[in-house]
């Protein structure tokens, strides 16, 4: 027994999987921002109120005693509301009894999906830069990430590189559109190529659509599962967090074929049992909002995008204009820096604005993100103006 204890201490308590990735850099930057009194343009959460209707619905649900366990895979009211929303927005009928799993945010939806479908030794294709959870989630499944580059400034991918990434070991590909951190929205030609390759190699597509309604300049979001041959092999991961400005509610959902849903529900049950019951009731109310809400949402964020983009360009950053989501990737090389982590620390402690270092969206061994940082603009105009005032202290070298 003593020998076993000594070996544990020698090798450390962290598992081999846990040693392959770090804690969330995005969420760490929020803690660093608070420590320095910096304006937080790092983590993508709004600093303005959620819609009044959804807040009142949540209070009403609590007061009406929707406070015990809901059905593990989601209240019937919420699943019905999601199915109605899918039919309204995309003209597709899905079965709320057999094709939806309500989770504790899209974050749990993604890991539940991967654990339900991916085996140790499989490969999962990830577009890089990527939302930081994807790499860690794949590793936790015992699978191997295979990366395909999104090359700035348009963040397009090479057709040949994508084709080469598919192999007999490929089990799934993760597509995030609109994309975090780049703001890229995958177009129909790109999605049709992905669909063609998925069908050819019998690969699942996991489509993270959390920013589906935050779009600019007449760009359209095309769900991969609406393309021919992709309905039964695409798993859509979504959430109410970004669309309704309630990131703390942790209400997400997974839409998939009945066969895949059965597996996702089992994994979800043993991960979290279920999402908060009263907030599910309130989320169902939010899905009844009409098209004018979504148009207003996009316009609301477009104004903030254009404002912050102008501020950053005047300050000296080279920026990529996002097509969707609420982030701006900025190149720091005009300031004479080639270390995104060091620049981020300087920006937070000396300038008073917290952002995310670009390297956190790339695999650890990659140098591709060292010249990039990410700003978020899901903030009140007062917050963005205060950040603009502080950024005036930046000097080009």
Image (tube, grey):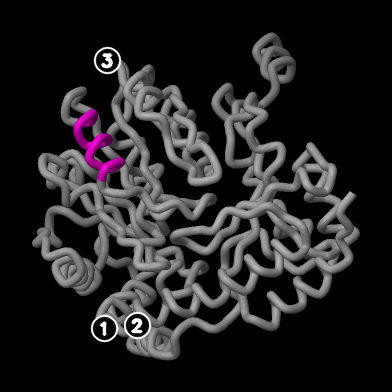
Q: Is residue 361 left or right of residue 176?
A: right
Q: Main secondary structure of the magenta part?
A: helix
Mark 2, secondary structure of its residue? helix
The reply to whether the C-beta atoms of the residues labelled 1 and 2 are less than 8 Å apart is yes
Give me the C-alpha separation between circle 1 and circle 2.
Answer: 6 Å
Q: Where is residue 166? Give x, y as percent.
A: 32, 21
From this viewpoint, is residue 200 visible? yes
Residue most toward the top?
Answer: 3
Residue at the (16%, 53%) spot, across then down: 99
Q: Is 191 colored magenta in this rendering?
A: yes
Say the numbered circle drawn on residue 293: 2
Mark 3, secondary structure of its residue? loop
User: Dot 2: within a 10 Å radius of its alpha carbon, few (fewer than 14), some, or many (20 or more) residues?
Assistant: some
Quarter of the N terminus within the rendering = top right
Chain-order first, disc 3 or disc 2: 3
Write the start and end of the magenta stretch as one range: 189-198
Residue at the (78%, 63%) spot, across then down: 315
Q: Where is residue 43? Give x, y as percent.
A: 62, 60
Q: Is 98 colored magenta in this rendering?
A: no
From this viewpoint, is residue 275 visible? no
Q: Nearer the viewer, residue 179 or 95?
A: 179
The residue wearing badge 1 is 290
Up-down: is 288 above or below 22?
below
Residue at the (79%, 38%) spot, across then down: 339
Q: Nearer the viewer, residue 312 or 137?
A: 312
Quadrant of the rendered image containing residue 216: bottom left
The residue wearing badge 3 is 168
């Amino acid at each position: 027994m003593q020998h076993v204890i000594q070996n544990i201490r020698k090798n450390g308590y962290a598992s081999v999987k846990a040693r392959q990735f770090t804690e969330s850099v995005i969420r760490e930057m929020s803690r660093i921002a608070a420590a320095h009194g910096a304006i937080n343009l790092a983590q993508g959460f709004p600093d303005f109120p959620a819609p009044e209707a959804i807040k009142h619905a949540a209070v009403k649900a609590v007061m009406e005693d929707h406070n015990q366990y809901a059905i593990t895979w989601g209240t019937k009211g919420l699943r019905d509301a999601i199915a109605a929303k899918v039919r309204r927005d995309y003209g597709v009928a899905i079965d709320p009894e057999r094709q939806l799993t309500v989770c504790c945010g899209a974050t749990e939806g993604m890991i539940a999906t991967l654990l339900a479908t991916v085996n140790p030794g499989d490969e999962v294709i990830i577009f890089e830069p990527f939302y930081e959870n994807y790499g860690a989630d794949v590793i936790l499944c015992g699978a191997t990430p295979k990366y395909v580059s999104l090359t700035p400034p348009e963040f397009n991918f090479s057709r040949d590189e994508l084709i080469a990434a598919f192999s007999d070991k490929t089990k799934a590909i993760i597509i995030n559109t609109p994309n975090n951190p780049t703001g890229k929205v995958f177009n129909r030609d790109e999605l049709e190529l992905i669909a063609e390759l998925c069908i050819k190699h019998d690969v699942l597509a996991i489509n993270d659509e959390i920013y589906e309604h935050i779009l600019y300049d007449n760009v359209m979001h095309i769900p991969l599962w609406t393309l021919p041959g992709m309905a039964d092999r695409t798993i859509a991961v979504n959430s109410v967090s970004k669309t309704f400005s309630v990131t703390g509610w942790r209400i997400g959902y997974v839409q998939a074929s009945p066969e895949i849903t059965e597996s996702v529900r089992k994994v979800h049950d043993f991960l979290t049992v279920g999402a908060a019951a009263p907030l599910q009731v309130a989320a169902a109310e939010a899905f009844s909002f009409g098209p004018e809400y979504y148009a207003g949402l996009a316009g609301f964020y477009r104004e903030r995008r254009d404002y912050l983009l102008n501020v950053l360009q005047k300050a000296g950053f080279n920026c990529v204009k996002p097509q969707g989501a609420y982030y701006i990737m900025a190149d720091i090389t005009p300031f004479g820096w080639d270390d995104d982590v060091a620049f981020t620390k300087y920006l937070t402690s000396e300038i008073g604005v917290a952002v995310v270092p670009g390297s956190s969206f790339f695999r650890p061994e990659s140098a591709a993100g060292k010249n990039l940082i990410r700003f978020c603009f899901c903030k009140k105009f007062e917050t963005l103006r205060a950040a603009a005032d502080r950024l005036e202290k930046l000097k080009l070298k």
